[in-house]
Amino acid sequence: MNENLLENQIFTQKNLETLNTLRNQLQYNQSFLQLLLDTIPNPVFYKDINGIYQHCNDSFSKMIIGVEKELIIGKSLYDLPEYIPTELADIYSNKDQELFSNPGTQFYEAKVKCADKKLRYFNFYKATFMSEENKVLGLVGVMLDVTTYKNIQIELEKKNLELKKLSIVDELTNLYNRRYFEEMFQKKIEKLNREKKPFCFAIIDVDYFKDYNDGFGHLKGDETLKKISLILKKTFNRANDYQFRLGGEEFGILFDVDKVENAIKIIKKLIENISSEKIETYNQSVSDFLTVSIGLGFIENIDLNNQNFKDELYDRIDRKLYESKKEGRNRFSLEII
């Protein structure tokens, strides 16, 4: 009897020693894991299936939230409104639910309001954590600060837009240039071919502008071209209206109308707007104020078999411009094509 009791005591003692060893090893592993996570400079967090923070590293608690871990663990995104704005919490929560619904990995970029109150861009790398029964237990996330890269990217995109603008905009008038006209003219023709919707092309030339430059000088001539450009923008101000400086004192307009009558109406409005500006003219024996002559084309048909259609179309409208000049200027001439 005593021998059995002694054996049980010895067995129990060994089990306790084994449990203590396992407990110490587990504590060591947990300490090591915590040290490892806290050494990682990137924010790391772990949430359960209910979106409750179960763990995070120092970088997450200090850099992202700005409080001790103990105040984060056991909380959800919506339990920390003073640190995580609701509009951002909604974004993160929706992403979490997407991942829970489709277990695996997830990557996305999002803005984060950090502990210093500054908004930064982060890449989120997240993965679901599964049980042995293949049940989703939660997710682990790692965040990478890409603010510097993002700012450089934004600045580069801005510079590219500026360069593109410089390549398609006339420096003097700030209208689109001849190069961009050629591109948009082709697109308008292609759109007409696809959608069978007519468009208009007008060539506008300032009357007696050589006399104006010779008499008043090129500086004043440039200022007048700027005034004409502003009137073009004011008159043709819809989203699909395009104003161009084709060269010298010659301008072009591409615009959409469904009827010839509407095209005539807007061109008459342009002539009226220029007249009402009362820009001084040099040759007052011809006119008291500066005028323009216009060639207008209402284009509703294209010749697909003609490879030179675009050039011939331009020439036909140009001839209408000189028809206006020949008939006394300060007018427009129309051709329906």
Image (spheres, helix red, strand yellow):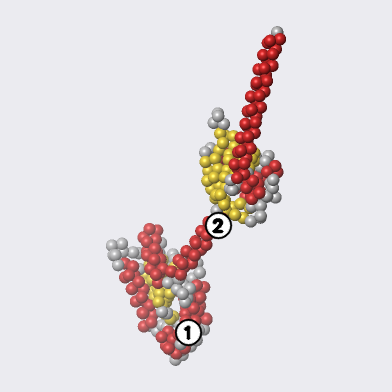
> In this rendering, would 48 be left or right of 305?
right
Q: Distance between the residues labelled 1 and 2?
A: 45 Å
Give the amino acid type for the residue marked by disc 2 in the picture.
Thr
Looking at the image, which is closer to me, 265 or 100?
100
Q: Earlier in the sequence, mark 1 or mark 2?
A: 2
Residue with the mark numbered 2: 148
- Image-quadrant location for residue 322: bottom left
Q: Which residue is drawn at 49% across and 81% down?
A: 223
Whether residue 265 is visible, yes or no, is no
> In this rendering, would 264 be left or right of 89?
left
| Mark 2 nearby-residue class (10 Å; few <14, some 14–19, many ≥20) | few
Residue 250 image label: none
Q: Residue at x 39, y 61 (%)?
A: 191
Q: Residue at x 50, y 72 (%)?
A: 233
Whether residue 309 is visible, yes or no, is yes
Q: What element carries label 1?
A: helix
Give the amino acid type for the residue marked by disc 1 in the picture.
Leu
Quarter of the figure that contains the C terminus: bottom left
> In this rendering, would 248 be left or right of 152?
left
Q: Is mark 2 on a helix, strand or loop?
A: helix
Question: Horizontal and vertical percent for residue 291?
Answer: 45, 82
Q: Kindly give the residue lying farthest to the bottom in the view shown.
A: 285
Image height of 125 relative to 251, above or below: above
Residue with the mark numbered 1: 219
Image height of 41 relative to 169, above or below: above
Q: Residue at x 55, y 57 (%)?
A: 148
